[in-house]
């Protein structure tokens, strides 16, 4: 079966600065891809290119015939007045799902994402206004909006951003049981370890594919760099030997044939480039001075949060310690 998505020779620049150059890779059935790399490497831009939201400067992305692509951006915005239910209904209207199945699909999808009609303490009502939701619940809604269309490949840009622990666990469980392919961007190595089976790194304007989760990627990348350094060392030794022979015998007529042979060999060598190591941030936390015997004292602490339905959620009630 052909790939769901197939990118060939894709390049993109940001102004005069190239983000990535001539990237080629495919998304196949069963792929659970983590797209990683330093900030500014072009990961979000690449995902937008795959989603047909951004045009590449060169190359093209082919989508398998009749394949559906779902795309969840980093930040999801909703118009004022649009309810959770209406967002999902509008998504269903853009699909081939028969109208008589819309309600069941809507309830199943929103239920999995934690939305309900009963106003339970752990859920948000379906008639809540989408724009008033917290960042975490807006992210849940955006993922539900994409998954209700049953995409063959789901593209997720930083899906764990704004998620509390409960929402992150929900997303982790959802992706572990997701039957179709997905590509996600994340800096959360533990989350990547739990959900992906292939790691794609965008770095130094190129792409490298590693089979396995993030921990496996770290091992494979170190092995790959060791091999690169060994090849680079061998090549440098050969180049230095050729240059030394050429410089030593260039003026001798009896060695002209051998010198020309080595000059041609030197010209044909495709030089191995060793990229700079990624920058690493180091922290140092000085030892703080000793505190008093009582570090914190809390008396009669109460905390509530307003809910989208107009109610109030009490999370702390007259707490003292």
Image: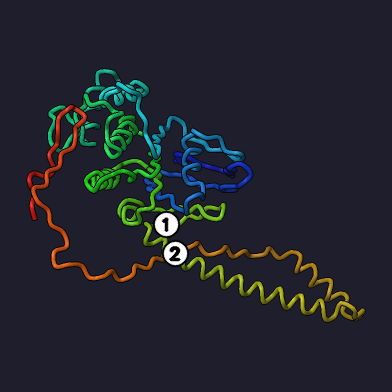
Residue name at image x 20 percent, y 67 percent: 291
Outermost top residue = 99
Label at residue 211: 1
Residue 305 lies in quadrant = top left
Please indicate whether residue 241 sits to the left or right of residue 78 in the image.
Answer: right
Could you tell me how far apart the alpha carbons at marks 1 and 2 are, in whole angstroms? 9 Å
Name the residue located 61 percent from the left edge and 41 percent from the top edge. 15
44 or 256: nearer the viewer? 44
Q: Indicate the quadrant containing the C terminus: top left, top right, bottom left or bottom right.
A: bottom left
Residue 267 appears at what percent x and percent y?
Answer: 76, 65
Residue 316 relative to residue 154: left or right:
left
Q: From the viewer's perspective, is residue 211 above or below residue 264?
A: above
Residue 302 falls left or right of residue 23? left
- Does the residue at mark 1 contact the one at mark 2 (Cβ under 8 Å)? yes
Q: In which quarter of the image is residue 69?
A: top left
Which circle marks residue 144 in the picture? Answer: none
Q: Quadrant of the N terminus?
A: top left
Along the viewing direction, whichever of 201 and 300 lies nearer the viewer: 300
Residue 59 lies in quadrant: top right
Give the colouring mode of the picture.
Answer: rainbow
Q: Can residue 166 be seen in this view?
A: yes
Q: Which residue is drawn at 45% across and 57% down?
A: 210
**Residue 207: percent from the left, percent from the top?**
52, 52
| Residue 2, percent from left and from top | 47, 40
Residue under pointer 2: 220
Residue drawn where x is 43% and y is 30% of the image: 66
Q: Is residue 18 above or below residue 4?
A: below
Q: Where is residue 94 in the image (x, y as percent from the top left)?
A: 37, 22
Of pointers 1 and 2, the one earlier in the residue sequence:
1
User: Could you say whether the residue bearing mark 1 is in a helix, strand or loop?
Assistant: strand
């Amino acid at each position: 079966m052909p790939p769901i998505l197939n990118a060939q020779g894709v390049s993109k620049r940001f102004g005069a600065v190239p983000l990535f150059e001539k990237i080629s890779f495919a998304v196949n059935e069963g792929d659970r891809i983590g797209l990683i790399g330093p900030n500014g490497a072009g990961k979000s831009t690449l995902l937008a290119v795959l989603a047909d939201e951004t045009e590449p400067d060169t190359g093209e992305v082919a989508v398998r015939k009749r394949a559906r692509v779902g795309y969840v951006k980093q930040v999801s915005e909703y118009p004022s007045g649009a309810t959770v239910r209406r967002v999902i209904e509008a998504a269903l209207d853009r699909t081939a799902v028969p109208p008589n199945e819309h309600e069941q699909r809507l309830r199943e999808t929103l239920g999995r994402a934690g939305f309900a009609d009963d106003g339970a303490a752990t859920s948000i009502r379906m008639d809540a206004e989408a724009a008033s939701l917290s960042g975490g619940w807006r992210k849940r809604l955006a993922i539900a909006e994409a998954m209700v269309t049953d995409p063959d490949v789901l593209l997720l840009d930083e899906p764990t951003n704004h998620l509390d622990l409960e929402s992150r666990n929900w997303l982790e469980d959802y992706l572990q049981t997701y039957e179709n392919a997905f590509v996600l961007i994340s800096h959360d190595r533990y989350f990547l370890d739990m959900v992906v089976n292939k790691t794609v790194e965008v770095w130094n304007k190129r792409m490298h594919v590693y089979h396995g989760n993030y921990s496996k990627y770290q091992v494979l990348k170190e092995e790959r760099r060791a091999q690169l350094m060994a090849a680079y060392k061998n090549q440098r030794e050969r180049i230095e030997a050729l240059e030394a022979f050429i410089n030593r015998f260039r003026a001798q007529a009896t060695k002209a044939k051998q010198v020309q042979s080595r000059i041609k060999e030197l010209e044909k060598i495709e030089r191995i480039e060793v990229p700079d190591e990624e920058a690493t941030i180091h922290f140092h936390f000085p030892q703080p001075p000793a505190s008093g015997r009582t570090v914190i004292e809390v008396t009669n602490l109460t905390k509530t949060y307003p809910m989208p339905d107009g109610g109030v959620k009490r999370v702390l009630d007259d707490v003292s310690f």
